[in-house]
Image (cartoon, rainbow, N blue to C red):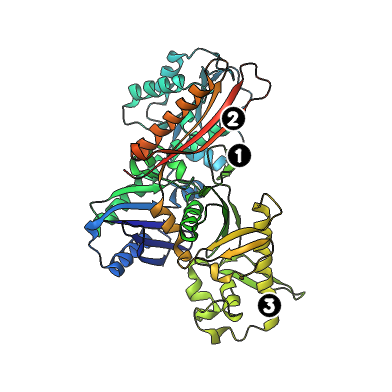
Amino acid sequence: MYRLGIDVGGTNTDAIILDEEHQVVSFVKRHTSLDVGSGIEAALSAVLDDSGIDPKQINAVMLGTTQITNAVVERKKIAKVGVLRLAYPATLSIKPFTYWPQDLVEKLGGLYAVVPGGYEYDGQILSELDEEAVKKQLAEWQGQVESVAVIGAFSSLKTDQEARVAALVHEAYGNEFPVTQSAEIGSIGLIQRENASILNAGLFKVIATTITGFKQALADKGVDNADLYLTQNDGTLMTAEFAQRFPILTIGSGPTNSIRGAAYLAGKDDAIVVDIGGTTTDLGVLKNGFPRESAIAVEVGGVSTNFRMPDILSIGLGGGSIVRVQPDGSVTVGPDSVGYEITEKALCFGGDTLTATDIAVRMGLADVGDKTKVSGVSQEVAEAGLAEIKHMIEVAIDKMKTSADDIEVILVGGGAIIAPDHLAGVAKVIAPEKGGVANAIGASISQISGTVDRIYPYTKIDREEALKQAEVEAGEHAKTAGALPDTLSVVEREEIPLAYDPNQSTRVKIKVVGELA
């Protein structure tokens, strides 16, 4: 039996097939198309033809896609959302959709209501849930909304009010109506958690279309015995059904696929991963084999959110970055790029645009295209261009480091050929043989995860009992996402006490991973 991994990037779509021992059977790289779908189909056809295996022997397919991210950025196919905040009257000073881009609010419909409900930071009732107010609001929204987001004050402490409102929504609109409960999306912090929940609720149509289209493409190629998984932004997988409930968790999954793939190829659990594509370079930190999470609020499409996201630094440097000689003689690289048109526009491929790849070919770092076509690039320009590329990568690495010590760097991505072998502040540069498709490999070898982020008052619940409760809940999330129960293990446990709280309230975060069921 085999695994098929496909990762859709901004420039290239990569496909790879692994055997039962996680050994690479075949891999291909194709340009990402404007409609995304045809690029996926081209990569899928090529990798199946190249491998020569029976498509019915593929029993698991993993997809890493940028389509959810693109939907937010481009404001396309977004559903109308009704926002129910359970926190009246305490939170009226900052209403839902505050500081949102107006065009995104219009796409989502801008409908919201603040009703009595919610909890205090110590678990006491802020206000009793007013079910009649909820029912009245749902009746007013009938036919105007396509999904509902429910956000309770401190619902990460107690989830019962959000669950009850979700039940009322299903009573009013039907059991299949999409409902997002904020406690399942973000952590503490009402506004950012609300923002993430609204975005999640607005993306259900995009993820449904993506999954349906991908399943059809697989069926057309005879891959009809496989379970479908999507990659999450923490470097793990989730079933297609789970992804339809939490589409927002796919945002940021591209860089994490590369980080996980780099860890597998290099055999390292701790390092900085530098993933150079055609347009951008993404840097992430490997910590115990998984991507380091961002500790700050992350903006998605101009909206501040607090759901889990990888700590990624992106710079405008890639294989297709345009190189220019300035009037003062200096050389700049990027941030604009020829992107997926590199094989038509770069000098080494017969084009008329000087790119970072041309500099690498001219300096003997890469052997692609026709070397003679870059002979007109002067040695001074080539050296200055390479020095700028080196400087950009070194500065980015320095920003990701947490100490002054030299650290190992794993270099992956289709554009890795532009990077020099030696970098300041780096103990060793590791360039795996199949690093060009590290993202697809990362998607293919990933595990299933479940995460819980809760607040527990240790004066009211024993610490060991709270930790065990959170671990069990995280395990249930992992099983729901598709993990085998007997393979579950805790890979991350974090406790952060809330200052000056007499109840010793502590934020507990636990992550559990398991193998594919």
Which residue type does callout 1 highlight? Ala
Q: Answer with mark 2 or mark 1, whichever residue precedes in sequence.
A: 2
Q: CA–CA distance between discs 2 and 1?
A: 10 Å
Q: Answer with mark 1 or mark 3, whichever residue precedes in sequence.
A: 1
Q: Answer with mark 2 or mark 3, whichever residue precedes in sequence.
A: 2
Q: CA–CA distance between discs 1 and 3?
A: 39 Å
Residue 111 at x, y percent in the picture: 49, 30
Q: Quadrant of the N terminus?
A: bottom left
Q: CA–CA distance between discs 2 and 3?
A: 49 Å
Residue 283 at x, y percent in the picture: 58, 56
Residue situated in front as seen by the camera: 184 or 486 = 486
How many neighbours does mark 2 have within 10 angstroms: few (below 14), some (14-19), or many (20 or more)? some
Q: Secondary structure at mark 2?
A: loop
How many neighbours does mark 1 have within 10 angstroms: few (below 14), some (14-19), or many (20 or more)? some
Which residue type does callout 3 highlight? Glu
Residue 169 at x, y percent in the picture: 38, 24
Residue situated in front as seen by the camera: 10 or 265 = 265
**According to the image, label 2 marks what residue?**
189
Q: Are marks 2 and 1 in contact (CB under 8 Å)?
A: yes
Which residue type does callout 2 highlight? Gly
Disc number at residue 321? none
Q: Quadrant of the C terminus?
A: top left
**According to the image, label 3 marks what residue?**
383
Figure check: 432 above or below 492: below
Residue 405 at x, y percent in the picture: 69, 55
Q: What residue do we see at 58% from left, 47% from top?
A: 311
